[in-house]
Image: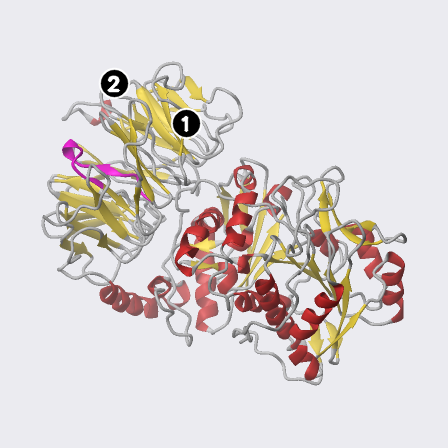
Amino acid sequence: MLFEIEISGEPGAYQVEVLHSEGGGRPRERLVLDPVSILRHRTELENAVLASSVQSRRIVPAAEEPLRMVGQQLFEALFTGHVYGAYRASLGAAQQQQKRLGVVLRIVEPELAALPWEALFDPETEEYLCRSEPLIRHVDAPYTAEPLEVRPPLRILGLVASPRGLPILDVAAERQRLEQALAKPRAAGLVELAWAPDVSWEGIHEQMLSDTWHILHFVGHGDYDVIRQEGVLALVGPDGGADLIEAGRLRDLLCEAEPTPRLVVLNSCSSGEAGVGDLFSGTAAALVQRGISAVAAMQFSITDGAAIRFARGFYTAIAHGRPVDEAVRSGRVGILGSARTLEWITPVLYVKTDSAQLFRLTGMAAPDTGTALDTETAPGTGIGADMGVAANTGTAPGTGIATGTATDTGIAVATGTAAYGHPAGRTGEKPPGRPGRGPRPRRRRRWLLAAAAITAAAAVIIGIVVTAGSHGSSGSPSGWPYSTGFSVYTRPYLVNGTIYVGNTSGHVYALNASTGAFRWRYPRGSAIGAVYSRPGVADHMVYVGSDNGLIYAIRARDGAAVWSSRCDENGDAVRSSPVFVDGVIYASTRGGSVCALKADDGSRFWDRPVLLGTTVPASSPEVSRHLPGSPPSQVLLYLGSDNGHVYALSGRTGKIQWQFPRSGQPGLGALAAQPAISSDGSVVYAGSNDGHLYALDADTGRLDWKYPATAQGLDGAIGAQPAVAAFSTTVYFASGFGVYAITGRGGKPSLTWKTDPVELASNTGQSGPVATAGDVYVGSGKHVVCLDASNGSLCWHPPFTADSRVVTTPVVGNGVDTIYVGTLDGNVYALTPGGRVLRAR
């Protein structure tokens, strides 16, 4: 079963469209993503993957942080809005039939093809897609070959090229390792392995003409020519030196065989690295585009053990008739036999066929492609440690051959860390875990993913699991941190000695702000939709939005529901924070609507919602400075939108008073973060995914200034609301790894800070800063960092460290006596002014 999507467009206007869904429909959404910011950090990600193979188990989560960050960013950008709903419905349909759902990516734009889509990480299930489902990069080609009918054995031609002048390969050892990896299928008569005695152009040409080959396995050196923008492999020239063969000529050479080998496995240094100017410039993609049915390669260097395990799992699956996408997933499962390594991300698969079934094996039972292949993963056997030798040293690719140690394999797909975006808009319920496979340890969230095809069953499962997995009335026995059991993306709300917070299981909690003791949870039983909306409290009521499209009014004293109402007619997810203004609740949806409801009963205050942009998420509203009791006509709402505009709406009618840029003009980068108001109410600050902070006149929307003033923005998106200290002209904001302090006039960096920006150890993501009279607090990776507001120096040594990533902007209690944050693992922390966890008093 397949879920096929196409990614196309141009920078600033990418879109993702569902081409095939098991749940039906072809929804289309905007793809908000900055590939350049990710590509800048490719070396950091590769180093993290390699480092994981040599670190102890207790260090692996820290090593995994860059991989998980970029994977979640890609997932939340790709699976957004109705695309997300279609994916969940398809996944539920596949699970109901106990089959796997192959995810097929058709990537039209070259700069997007260069991204590490194999890292896609679902924060709801805490799983990487490629580990649970087959993941394919589909390459359009003019001709698609039918599966080749083969009576076993499958014939594999092995090439080990070690030309003079490049790092020397132990040819005999390379051969021995691959032979060991294939020992079982060879003994069973399923595969036959032969070695080319001459790996020159002429020698391979003779092999192609003289015999039948189904698979070509290449071990050697490769590189990416940035001048010609094409991948090259190094064969052995007439003089024993390197003969650099680009992808086009290699394909012509392989097509001399009859039939042409259906599968090529490349274990070379940069054989999959793609230039951003030509979608097929990388060797792997080019081979597929020019006629090879499938190419499996490595996007990073890979260690000996991981290479051995991948080869064993991959070839065993192919030999048993599995489709090549299932075979790659089986190779990843093989790598997972070493629990410490993250190298399962390294394999990449390109296909051009409509089906990943390359071979139709005769004389043997048809494979069951709906279940995972159990592969042997014991160390000591398998293909050689030096799968593709030339180590990537982290330097920029050149026109020559990459050099390094003999443990580098793999095509390099540029990747890296970048700022988290806001959680992508999602619709629909979430499907339960896969039937017949049983829940995995510490994976309760997978049972909360209900699909449309099994809604009734999901409701039962959700009700049981949530009740069993959450705190009762006792709360955390030792005080803070309090565990809600599921990710806390909502910024906590503190009022009258109580902390209110929601989580992705679809619950809202009320906790004692001093002790962390449980007060109540809404709902008490089965969940509502996931809560990414920050609760708002007014007149003894808690107002909160949900992914099920409803806004809830809950009694603050006991958690009893008073009313619920849809924000828009479509029931789009409400991830904005509801704002209470003199008896009216204002909120926005992931579908681009803004609504106004009467706070007493949830009925419409505006006749109908205001649509800012079709299926374009709007930020939480920020309210203009006004006196209590001001008529709604004197209230303005300021919102950003993913269409790249900032809007000011009338609180009385919802009519747009102004927008920046003006109507009809192209938008900026996505403005997903809630705007902020200067302390005197005259300026609106809006942060954009284009890396700029915009200062706009609050009355007219005229641009006062932007920072930086140049067209090139900062390295990271500004994904969280800027902070303005009371009675101050300084605005603070986070972008990527930096925190900035900018004066309120002229857009100049604050001269009072020692450095601008203050560089942090980890990406701030969607955790923005909060400013007090003396300090600035911000989340950074697993840390909460305290900065002196006057000069930017660290005031906590070291910063506070949580067990998981901090994904909320901190909240500061009155008098700066306590700082509260939520984390990805579902904890809510209360910290003392010195940066220590608050304990029950």
- Residue 224 vertical position relative to residue 684 in the rendered view, above or below: below
Q: Position of residue 808 (x, y in %)?
A: 31, 42
Q: Are marks 2 and 1 in contact (CB under 8 Å)?
A: no
User: In the rendered view, does 683 fall on the left or right side of 543?
Assistant: right
Residue appearing at x 57%, y 63% in the figure: 306
Q: Position of residue 269 (x, y in %)?
A: 68, 52
In the foreground, 542 or 443: 443
Q: Is residue 144 visible?
A: no
Q: Is residue 817 magenta?
A: yes
Residue 226 vs residue 86, the one in the foreground: 226
Residue type highlighted by circle 2: Asp
Viewer-closest of 312 and 168: 168
For mark 2, does the 10 Å Cα neighbourhood hold few (<14), some (14 to 19), or many (20 or more) residues?
few
Question: Regarding mark 1 in the picture, which secondary structure is present there?
Answer: loop
Closer to viewer: mark 2 or mark 1: 1
Going by the numbered disc 1, the residue's amino acid type is Pro
Q: How many marks?
A: 2
- Residue 626 appears in the rendering: yes
Residue located beneath label 2 in the image: 680
- Which residues lie in the magenta part? 807-819
Of labels 2 and 1, earlier in sequence is 2
Residue 835 sits above or below residue 301 on the image? above
Does residue 181 show up magenta in the picture? no
Please give the residue where the numbered disc 1 appears in the rendered image: 757
Distance between mark 2 and mark 1 Cα atoms: 25 Å
Side of 92 relative to 385 (left or right): left
